[in-house]
Amino acid sequence: MKPTFKTRLLMTAIMSVILYSILFLGSQTPLTRGEAQQLMEQLEQIAASIDSPFFIFFNNFGLSLLMALPFAGILVGGWVIYETGRYFSAMAMIYEISPTILIFLPIIMVYGILEFIGYGGMVTSGLILSHKIIRRQFRVEIKYYLLTLLLFAVVILIAAIIEYYLIIVARDVLREVGGIL
């Protein structure tokens, strides 16, 4: 059986929602003040090194490639997304903001929707390829797998470009506000 385009699209949507739910669970993880501070320091180091949309893209695409691995990708993806949720939990604690509000900001800003579609598509590709490997139909699926990786790489790149420019705007606004105060 060859999954149709519609089936693949539906699976991608379902996987995107599952991954976003895992992000939500991670964001609700109780942290100690020390853990939150440590995660925020790591996040600040990462944020300070963002110098182009390609930095964000290579980070997110690298993680998504791990999510596309046959058999292990779904576990890797779940763990990565859960850990990302913990960063939201840390931000919420440090800035005294609801973690639920924080995890919806990327969705409101559109790039989060694109990222999770990309991640959902990558995990779905890995799942389908895993199924085809078990059924000994690997050769039939490999071209769809590679095309899917390419398609979702483009989606993740678009998300990275949007995210980068939102970061630049936020930095500029914060500098202006800081200069006024």
Image (cartoon, rainbow, N blue to C red):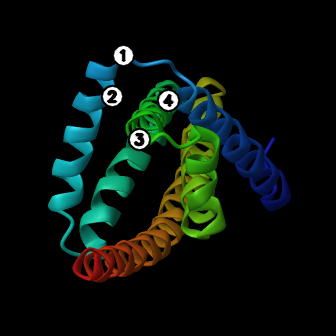
Between discs 4 and 2, the one toward the N terminus: 2
Nearest to the eye among marks 4 and 2: give it: 2
With 1 as the anchor, is 120 left or right in this view?
left
Tag 2 and tag 1, C-beta contact below 8 Å = yes
Return the x and y of residue 105 as percentages of the image width and height.
Answer: 59, 59
Q: Amino acid at mark 2?
A: Ala
Q: In what element is the residue under mark 2?
A: helix
Answer with mark 3 or mark 1, whichever residue precedes in sequence. Answer: 1
Q: Residue flagged by tag 4: what amino acid is it?
A: Tyr
Q: Quadrant of residue 5?
A: bottom right
Q: Which residue is mark 3?
A: 91
Indicate the position of residue 14 as horizontal and vertical percent values.
77, 43
1 vs 4, front mark: 1
- The amino acid type, in three-letter code, at marker 1 is Thr
Residue at point 15%, 61% (across, down): 49
The mark nearer the N terminus, 1 or 4, is 1
Q: Residue at x 49, y 29 (%)?
A: 82
Asked whether residue 137 appears in the rendered view, the answer is no
Residue 45 lies, with reference to residue 111, above or below; the image says above
Within-10-Å neighbours for mark 4: few <14, some 14–19, many 20+: many
Q: Label 2 crowding class (10 Å Cα cut-off): few <14, some 14-19, many 20+? A: many
**Looking at the figure, which quarter contains the C terminus?**
bottom left
Which residue is tagged 2? 36
Q: CA distance from mark 3 to mark 2?
A: 7 Å
Crowding at dot 3, Cα within 10 Å, few <14 / some 14-19 / many 20+, comes out as many
Q: Secondary structure at mark 3?
A: helix
User: Which residue lies under the disc numbered 4?
Assistant: 82
CB atoms of marks 4 and 2 within 8 Å: no
